[in-house]
Amino acid sequence: MAANSREIEFAEADLNDLKIAKSKLEYPGLTARVSQLVGKPIEAAFKRLPRDWNNRVGTITQAALLRGLEFAVLTIGKAETRDSRDWLHKVFVTVSGASGGAVGLPSLPVELPISTTLILRSIADIARSEGHDISLLEVKLSCLEVLALGGKSTKDAAAESTYWVVRGALAKAVSEAAAYIAEKGLAEKGAPPLVRLITTIASRFSIVVTEEVAAKAVPVVGAVAGGLINLLFMHHFQEMARGHFIVRRLEKKYNTKRIEQAYKTLQV
């Protein structure tokens, strides 16, 4: 970043945008909203899952993310800025969730890749609406990165800013994967740089997926509940994406270090 970019005073509108971004990124509250929907704490729903379900979710999640990475690299293209169509993606993912909810937990291996692809599609749409060129590989990978922003671990709870902790943890894996894909493409899906990226993101994305699956295990209204839970799932990641790409837009204007410092000092 050029030296004179550091001398730019923060515009009030940009600080307001940064405050909006922080409010979305640090206080997602998905678990509370899902618990409210199913009528009981989500922790109780975990008891309804099969004993080995965490491992099964992890495996299915990694497969879904690999397909999502292929989708992000190969199919997202046009770079023009336009308003995102959040509502349209919510409709699609609600229909997908309703179909899966009618079948129950056995539908997860089919339904999760579909909903993940729809979420990535919406994330890319939001990135474009914030002025990012989604034809660039780094932006496509940043769309995938959003899926890691949705799940908080116990280690994160004590962190000053979960968002910057996660970005820092992902930075090396994203950089190595970007370099590999730029040189060799996605021909070797088992290549270490791609495996590391997918594993790192899946370890966090599966936290939210497990919450979603647990909620669907509660005997409520079946298809209707499945659709509503997927709707919350999509809304959650749309909020994460909006916050993330606001921050990245402001980073291009002011540089990363200044934005991180301002972000951490803002009260929301």
Image: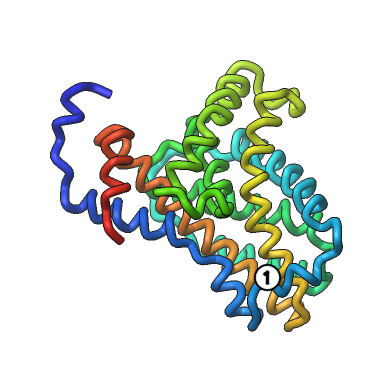
Q: Quadrant of residue 247?
A: top left
Q: The C terminus appears in which quarter of the rendering?
A: bottom left
Q: Is residue 16 left or right of residue 30?
A: left
At x 50%, y 42%, the residue is 166
Q: Residue furthest top?
A: 183
Q: Is 175 drawn above or below residue 143 in the view shown?
A: above
At x 29%, y 56%, the residue is 19
At x 52%, y 61%, the residue is 236
Q: Is residue 172 left or right of residue 74?
A: left
Q: Amino acid at mark 1?
A: Glu
Residue that label 1 marks: 43
At x 27%, y 53%, the residue is 266
Q: Is 263 drawn above or below residue 217 in the view shown?
A: above
Q: Is residue 16 left or right of residue 130?
A: left
Q: Percent position (x, y) of residue 98?
A: 72, 72
Q: The N terminus appears in which quarter of the rendering?
A: top left
Q: Circle 1 sits in a helix, a strand or a loop, which is it?
A: helix
Q: Percent position (x, y) of residue 149?
A: 52, 49
How many numbered circles are shown? Answer: 1
Q: Is 151 drawn above or below residue 78 in the view shown?
A: below
Q: Residues within 10 Å of mark 1 (few under 14, many from 20)?
A: few
Q: Percent position (x, y) of residue 147?
A: 57, 48
Q: Percent position (x, y) of residue 201?
A: 62, 42
Q: Is residue 184 left or right of residue 30?
A: right
Identify which residue, 154 or 114, lies in the foreground: 154
